[in-house]
Amino acid sequence: MSIGDNKALIADFMAEFSKKDNFDVWAGYLADTATWWIIGDAALFPVAGTKSKSEFVNLIRSLSPVVPDGIQFIPRHMIGEGNFVAVEAESFADATNGKKYHNYYHLKVEVRDNKIQSVKEYLDTMHVVDVLMS
């Protein structure tokens, strides 16, 4: 796939991820052996660390009751090289605790065989804890 194809795949993934309760569709963009790493110390930020595809899907499912209308995930900029795409993104959601979730991300995404193989996610972990886990 070309770098343009890889960027388009990631944009499509994020559009599907942004739809409420669309787990099976966006999970289809991930390879069966995909990993998703989230920055942080797991002792302080329980969602940190490397997750398998199923672990990541279950993590997002577990957040669903806290953001019943889903999380809108918007890519702002993408830069590609080979099988990798760097993505700057933002997310927006209304939490059941009345707080607004608005986070910023940097993702390093590896795409191979028309599937997302791995993601390294950097975000404001304190904002996640404050809005989604309190």
Image (cartoon, rainbow, N blue to C red):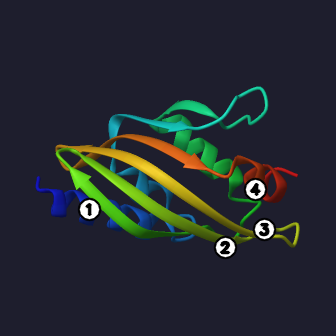
**Do the residues bearing badges 3 and 1 touch, measured as CB atoms within 8 Å?**
no
Q: Kindly identify the residue that appears in the image at 22 percent across and 57 percent down.
A: 6
Q: Amino acid at mark 3?
A: Ala
Against 104, residue 47 (above or below) is above
Residue tagged 4: 127
| Mark 2 lies on residue | 69
In the image, taking residue 79 as reference, residue 57 lies left or right, namely right
Q: Earlier in the sequence, mark 1 or mark 4?
A: 1
Task: State how far apart marks 1 and 4 are (Cα).
Answer: 27 Å
**Which image quarter: residue 102?**
bottom right
Residue found at the far top of this picture: 43
Tell me whether circle 3 and circle 2 mark residues in contact (CB < 8 Å).
no
Q: Residue at x 70, y 29 (%)?
A: 41
State the image coordinates of residue 98 (x, y, percent, origin top left). 87, 73
Residue 76 place in picture, x, y as percent: 43, 71
Q: Mark 3 — residue?
A: 95
Residue at the spot 35% in from the left edge and 51% down from the top edge: 28
Q: Which residue is mark 1?
A: 7
Of marks 3 and 2, which one's residue comes earlier in the chain?
Answer: 2
Q: Which mark is residue 91?
A: none
Nearer to us of marks 1 and 2 is 1
